[in-house]
Image: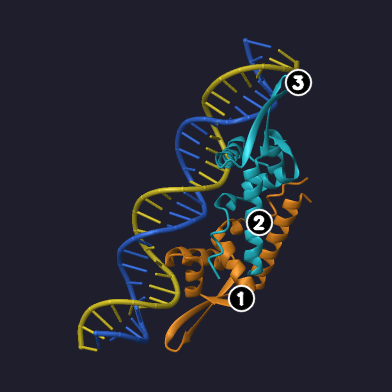
Chain colours: A orange, B cyan, C yellow, D blue
Amino acid sequence: MKNPIEALNKIFDSRIRLGVMSVLIVNDSISFNELKQLLELTDGNLASHLNTLEQAQYLKVQKSFIGKKTNTTYILTELGRHAFKAHLDALEKMIKGI
Amino acid sequence: MKNPIEALNKIFDSRIRLGVMSVLIVNDSISFNELKQLLELTDGNLASHLNTLEQAQYLKVQKSFIGKKTNTTYILTELGRHAFKAHLDALEKMIKGI
DNA sequence: TGAAAGTACTTTGTTTTTCAAAGTTAAAGT
DNA sequence: ACTTTAACTTTGAAAAACAAAGTACTTTCA
């Protein structure tokens, strides 16, 4: 058996980033504020995890206005979707001992 | 939807600890050396992750002799098995958006 | 109109975690 | 005697996580 750890994506070690990805897999997009409330995080902490994900090009940011309020929403990139899927596949294989 | 992150076990954030648990779910027991080779880790790194898992009472250590060499093997506790299962269940639910 | 509150950050600094490398102990091989 | 192996522990450095405070701009409320 080859080292099963290599196949896991280091970026998804974090529970928070896993949470963000899961939310975005199910929902097309989600706003900063919704994420903050859902995941119960401080602004800074959330922003930095989002930044990690954005650096990896796993998500894109869309800035718009709702009425006159700024609204920042996040959506998965194809790269992000694939990376997450690959990670979950690797995890499943690892657990099943394949 | 409630905060999905809470249900994830912080101890399983680490790829290495996930790897150890996966190996032990499939194999009844495994030795320090086998783990070290399988997961391609330094002694110290592996030992410290095993220690984290042991502190959480997720695994037990068994010391014995093979011939006249010391042999340390690790096995899951029931607590560890359940904690891992719970983590995987939580992860699955999170991803599926339940 | 002026104060408070909301959005979406960035910055700062502390705490926690990770990890490699070196040291340790004890026994075995040569 | 010297080296090797097993299974650590210790040390120290680097990276990551996090909270709190600061920022800039806007809006809402009194």
- Residue visible at 72% across and 51% down in the picture: A95
Asked if residue A45 shows in the view, the reply is yes
What residue did someone put label 1 on? A27
Q: Residue A22, located in which quarter of the rendered image?
A: bottom right
Could you tell me residue B76's position as x and y percent? 67, 41
Q: Nearer the viewer, residue C22 or A3?
A: A3
Q: In the displayed structure, would residue B98 be above or below residue D1?
A: below
Task: Identify the amino acid type marked 1.
Answer: Asn
Q: In the displayed structure, would residue C18 be above or below residue B73?
A: below
What residue did someone put label 3 on? B67
**Quadrant where the C terminus of chain B lies?**
bottom right
Q: CA distance from mark 1 to mark 2?
A: 21 Å
* Labels 1 & 2 near each other (Cβ < 8 A): no
- Residue visible at 68% across and 43% down in the picture: B39
Which label sits in the foreground, 1 or 2? 2
Q: In the displayed structure, would residue B58 be above or below residue C6?
A: above
Task: Identify the amino acid type marked 3.
Answer: Gly
Q: Chain of mark 3?
A: B
Question: How many labels were placed on the picture?
Answer: 3
